Amino acid sequence: MNYIKPSAFLLAGMILIAGCTPVPKSPMHLFPDEKGQEGYYRLKDSGVFESKAIKISVSLLEKTNPELDPMVSALLDKDFVVVRMDIVNYSPVRAMYNPAYTALMSDSFDYRKPLDYTDIYDMTANIPGFENGIAKLKGKFYDLNETVNPGEKSSKLLIFKPLSKDIKTAELSIKEVYIGTETIRLTFPFVLKAKVI
């Protein structure tokens, strides 16, 4: 029986075709960076600032979370950025957070302020199914000043318009959180990384 030896050209072509086969890419997501200001650390998918007086943690919600409110899922489907922020007051005085002093920025020069109830209502008023869902979100996201009494915790959402598609880093900046009469300024850095499946 005669065997035909493949030519060098044919072998090169086969290797080239095999090398061009697309490899599925892992989805890219923004994750809390490892490094930040003093008092900052990363804990799993959350960025955390902690001092003797207060603990604030932030995490970006993802579409894959099965426990999400349908309205939040719908916003994520439209590429809105939804951040869960928890505030724990360790101090003996009241803490106060005003979302007006918060911004989400990126390396693509995005600058987004948190949306309030009226903003979201206006943007979703003409989308079927949103008119009932938006009412259920009221009270679940930071809209106005939030007071956290000593020993108590607040856990709500911050909602932002979509960021640019080509970003590599982002930062949640909070200019002022009051603890009694003292103020602190916080930054939560994020980096774009492939999600491990």
Image: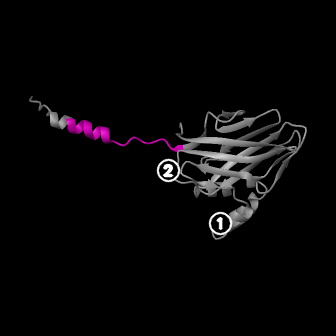
Dot 1 corresponds to which residue?
A: 123
Residue 116 location (% of width, % of height): 73, 60
Q: Quadrant of residue 163?
A: bottom right
Q: Can residue 186 be seen in this view?
A: yes
Q: How far apart are marks 2 and 1 (CA)?
A: 24 Å
**Quick one: SS at disc 1?**
helix
Q: In which quarter of the image is residue 178?
A: top right
Q: Residue 19: within the magenta?
A: yes
The local crowd at label 2, few if under 14, some if 14 to 19, many if 20 or more residues have their Cα within 10 Å, is few
Q: Given the current orientation, which residue lies at the most extreme right position?
A: 92
Q: In this view, does 71 lie to the left or right of 12?
A: right
- Disc number placed over residue 166 in the picture, else none: 2
Residue kind at label 2, given as amino acid type: Asp
Q: Is residue 145 left or right of residue 65?
A: right
Segment tinted magenta in the rendering: 12-28
- Disc number placed over residue 36 in the picture, else none: none
What residue is shown at x 71% (from left), y 37% (from top)?
A: 48
What residue is shown at x 25% (from left), y 36% (from top)?
A: 15
Q: Given the current orientation, which residue lies at the most extreme front position?
A: 182
What residue is shown at x 21% (from left), y 39% (from top)?
A: 13
What residue is shown at x 50% (from left), y 50% (from top)?
A: 166
Q: Given the current orientation, which residue lies at the most extreme left position?
A: 2
First of labels 2, 1 by sequence position: 1
Residue kind at label 1, given as amino acid type: Met
Residue 51 location (% of width, % of height): 78, 33
Residue 20 location (% of width, % of height): 31, 41
